[in-house]
Amino acid sequence: MLDAKQIIEDFRKLGVTEDDTIIVHSSYKALKGDDQIDGGAEAVIAALKETVKNGTLMLPTLSWESVTNENPYFIVATSESCVGILPEIMRVSDGVVRSPHPTHSVAIWGKDAEEIAKNHLKDFTPVGPNSPFHEVRRRKGKIIMLGCPLETNTSMHGVEELIVPPYLYSQNADYTITLTNGEKVTQAYLRHGFDDVEQRYDRILDVLDKKAYTQGKVLNAGTTVMDAAAVWEMGIKTLRENNMYFVDEAENEGCE
């Protein structure tokens, strides 16, 4: 039986401090491996909060799989995430605020959570300038891949949105968002496309300074902790030089 509080010590070894702003892409399966975690996913979320108890914790609660052109409705309080059990537990956890975006919402806890979340309503793209993903960069925070492959790093979409490579967008659509106060807002949004390409955001490590990231184990999960500002800076620089650097051609249709 694994003790979820070990997560805190493991993250300290990887350079995460109690006042950090972190956005965590997570795999509960990778964390527990062949073992069980005492307290389950709820204990993991509690440990993540304790890890940055004086800072800010964010987990993407993406819903692009269910909020579509055919079903253009997103309810901040109840629309489920499609990226695993930890984001689902996080979004209903005490003190958590969810950003109001139909496909790329983020669950936020800690310092300035309300302010960070509400600004996402100003964006009309998935990872626009008012999104929590950008806020991690502005606050000199960290992007964490907790048992997840680097290809799933959603912040890289924000980098792409600044350069707009040819594969990025598919079409725009109107979505209706029901806010936590019951108010409904209908807006037009651009959706990402990624048709005929395979996302290769793992290549960010090839252009980052080695001092800009650390790697190791958190419980059983292979983990990468990256300096968000460095990821954005080098991602933008690299895409300006080669706007297809972070993708490969694929035989099948890409997905987010």
Image (tube, grey):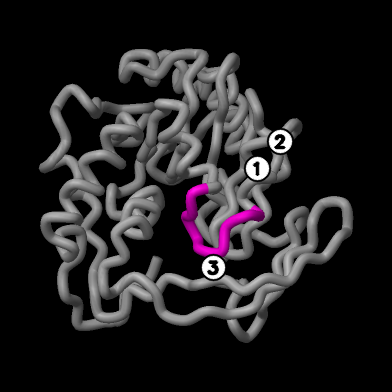
Q: Is residue 125 magenta?
A: yes
Magenta segment's dominant SS is loop
Q: Quadrant of the C terminus?
A: bottom left
Q: Residue furthest bottom?
A: 70
Q: Which residue is mark 1?
A: 117
What percent of the width, then of the height, locates residue 1? 49, 26
**Is residue 90 found left or right of 176 in the rendered image?**
left
Q: Residue at x 52, y 31 (%)?
A: 37
The magenta segment: 121-129
Q: Nearer the viewer, mark 2 or mark 3?
A: 2
**Is residue 173 found left or right of 118 in the rendered image?**
left
SS of the residue under disc 2: helix
Q: Which residue is mark 2?
A: 114
Amino acid on which the number 1 mark rests in the picture: Ala
Note whether residue 254 is visible.
yes
Q: Which residue is mark 3?
A: 64
State yes or no: discs 3 and 1 in contact (Cβ < 8 Å).
Answer: no
Whole-number angstrom distance, CA of label 2 to CA of label 3: 23 Å
Position of 35 relative to 242 (above/below): above
Q: Residue furthest right?
A: 182
SS of the residue under disc 3: loop
Whole-number angstrom distance, CA of label 1 to CA of label 2: 5 Å
Whole-number angstrom distance, CA of label 3 to CA of label 1: 18 Å
| Dot 3 or dot 1, earlier in sequence | 3
SS of the residue under disc 1: helix
Q: Residue at x 52, y 53 (%)?
A: 84
